[in-house]
Amino acid sequence: MTSYDYIDNNDDLIRCCLALQDSSVLSVDTEFVRERTFYPQPGLIQVSDGNNISLIDPNACDNLQPFFDLLESANIKIVMHSSSEDIELFYSIGCAVIHNLFDTQIAASWLGMGHSLSLQKVIEHYEQVVIEKQHSRTNWLNRPLSDPQLEYAAIDVLYLNSIYKQQHNALLELGYSDFVAEDCDLRCEQKSVEVSDQLAYLKVKKAFIATGESLDRLQQLAIWREQTARKDDKPRQHVIKDQQLLCIALEGSKTIEHLTKQCELPPFIIRHYGEQIIEAMNNLVTDTKPVLSLKSLPSANKTLNDCRALLLDINLEKNIPREVLPSKRWLEQFLLHHAAQWYPEPDGWKGWRKALLEKPLSKIINENKFNIK
C-alpha cells in the first residue's frame, strides 16, 4: 500500500508547498478528463519529493498558485513522464511557463529505449516492477475517489525520482544531458504558444481537396470552428466533424436548406450552429494560402528520400538515437515550409537540430533543385 497525503483545502495545500519549496527534484503527474471539452478538466495532481507523496484535489482548492510557484521555480527540477498533456493542463489553469523540466519519456528516447515509451515500461525497466493500469479510464472528476483509484494515481509518481537519477547519470555518461535539457525546454515552450486560428484549416483531414474559393471557405469555417470550440469548451469534432466542414466548403452552402440537403448535417448542428455557419460563409477573406501537397512539388520524393537517408547516416556516424531525429512527417513539414515561408515550420527547428541538420539538409535541397520549376 502506497502512503500519501490527500489535500483538498487551501491551508493544507499551502503547508504542502512550503514543505516542498526547498526540494531539488519533484516528480509530478496529473489525472484529467477531456473527452467532451476543448480544455482538459483537472481531476487530480500528484507530486512527490522522493519520500512523500501528495495528491492534490485541484477543484477543492481555490488558489493553486503555491503549487504553480513550485512548477515555475528555476531551482527545482520538475520530473514528468510524457509531459505534453500535463503541461497543457497546467498552462490552461493558470500556471506560467515551466522552466526546469525533465521528461523521462524524452530521456528514454535519447537512451535508445524507443519512441513514446509508456510509464509502465519505463518503471518496469528501471525498477523491475509491473504496474497494472486498471484505473486508466476512471472519471477523475467524480468524488469521492476510491482508495484503489488514489493508490493508482500515487504510483504514477512513486518511482519517478529514482528513475530520474538513473537516467540523468546515464545521459551524463553518454554526453546527452544538454540535448535532453534542450528538448525538455522546447516541450514547455511549445505548449505556451497557441497556433494561429488562421492556420486551423491545415489540420482538416483531406483539406487538399479544396481549391480556389472553396479553400477560402474552408479557412473561414475552420476559424469559426476553432473559436466556437474554444468558447463553448467542446472538442472540435463535437462542434462539427472534418468531413462535414469540408463538404460545406466544397458545396458553397449559403442557406440552411442547402446545409441540410446537400451536406446532410444533423438537426442538432443546424439548430445550434446553422446561422453561424452561414455567417462565416458570407464573410469570406480571399487571401487563403493554398494547402500544399509535397507530391505536387518538383523533386519532392527524391529530396524526401535523400533527407531520410541523411538521418540514417547521422544515426550511425554520430551515434544520435534514431528516436530523437526528425520523423518522416517532420521532414515533410520542413520541406513544405521551405517551399512556402507562410507554411508553419516544424517543431524543434532550433538548437541542436538546426546546428546539426541545417547545412546538410540545405545541400540536399539545392542538389535536387527542390521546388524549382
Image (cartoon, rainbow, N blue to C red):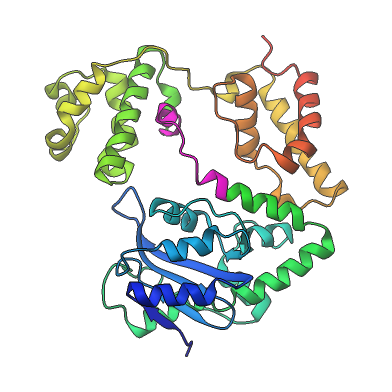
| Residue found 44% across the figure and 65% down from its top | 66
Residue 214 lies, in percent from the top left, at 35, 17
Q: Which residues are magenta?
A: 188-204
Task: Judge whether residue 14 can be spotted in this image.
Answer: yes
Task: Judge whether residue 134 can be spotted in this image.
Answer: no
Residue sitting at the far bottom: 1
Q: Nearer the viewer, residue 35 or 305?
A: 35
Residue 224 lies, in percent from the top left, at 29, 30
| Residue found 63% across the figure and 63% down from its top | 75
| Residue found 24% across the figure and 43% down from its top | 232
Q: Is residue 119 found left or right of 315 in the rendered image?
A: left
Q: Nearer the viewer, residue 301 or 360?
A: 360
| Residue found 66% across the figure and 73% down from its top | 163
Q: Is residue 216 found left or right of 19 in the rendered image?
A: left
Residue sitting at the far right: 317
Residue 7 lies, in percent from the top left, at 37, 77
